[in-house]
């Protein structure tokens, strides 16, 4: 058996931006994304719920995190057609998988 070359042992390379590990880390990296995911873990949440739950944050930071999580298909955004009209964010199947990983990393 030959030795693994350095390109085989690296998790990420500039030649392979689509490395699964790199994509996964990029999708949850940031100060607010893990907190948004945790907030939506039990049930769909509204934007103002997130602002109340994540007090240290602000509207722009939460908006950016939500957009990124939706783009990475970890959250879905649903406009609820009732009065008052509102938007709910819920975890996708991929998002639920990430929650399991985040919980596994929490200290005991």
Image: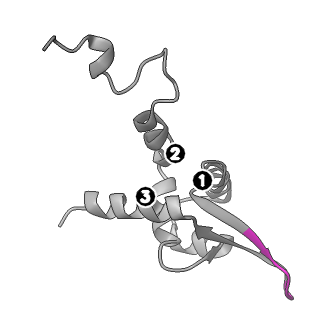
Mark 3–mark 2 contact, CB under 8 Å? yes
Q: Which residue is mark 3?
A: 98
**Relative to 80, residue 58 above or below:** above
**How far separated are the C-alphas under marks 2 and 1?**
7 Å
Residue 31 shown left or right of residue 106 in the figure: right
Q: Give residue 21's mark.
A: none
Residue receiving disc 1:
69
Camera-side residue of 65 and 42: 42
> Which residue is depicted at the point 66% across and 64% down?
76
Q: Where residue 94 sits: x, y (%)?
A: 51, 58
Instruction: Magenta stretch: give its range.
Output: 78-84
Q: Is residue 69 above or below residue 53?
A: above
Point out the residue furthest to the bottom here.
Answer: 83
Give yes or no for residue 105 being in the magenta stretch: no
Is 83 contained in the magenta span?
yes
In the image, which is nearer the foreground, mark 1 or mark 3? 3
Place of residue 103 in the rendered image (x, y in percent of width and height, measured from the top left): 32, 64
Q: Nearer the viewer, residue 2 or 90?
A: 2
**Which x, y percent locates residue 36?**
52, 63
Residue visible at 65% across and 55% down in the picture? 70
Image-quadrant location for residue 97? bottom left
């Amino acid at each position: 058996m030959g030795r693994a070359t350095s390109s085989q042992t690296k998790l990420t390379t500039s030649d392979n931006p689509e490395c699964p590990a790199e994509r996964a880390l990029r999708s949850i990296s940031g100060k607010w994304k893990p907190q948004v995911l945790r907030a939506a873990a039990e049930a769909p949440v509204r934007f103002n719920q997130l602002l109340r739950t994540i007090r240290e944050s602000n509207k722009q930071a939460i908006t950016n995190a939500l957009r990124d999580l939706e783009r990475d298909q970890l959250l879905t955004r649903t406009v609820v057609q009732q009065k008052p009209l509102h938007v709910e964010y819920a975890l996708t199947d991929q998002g639920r998988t990430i929650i399991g990983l985040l919980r596994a990393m929490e200290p005991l």
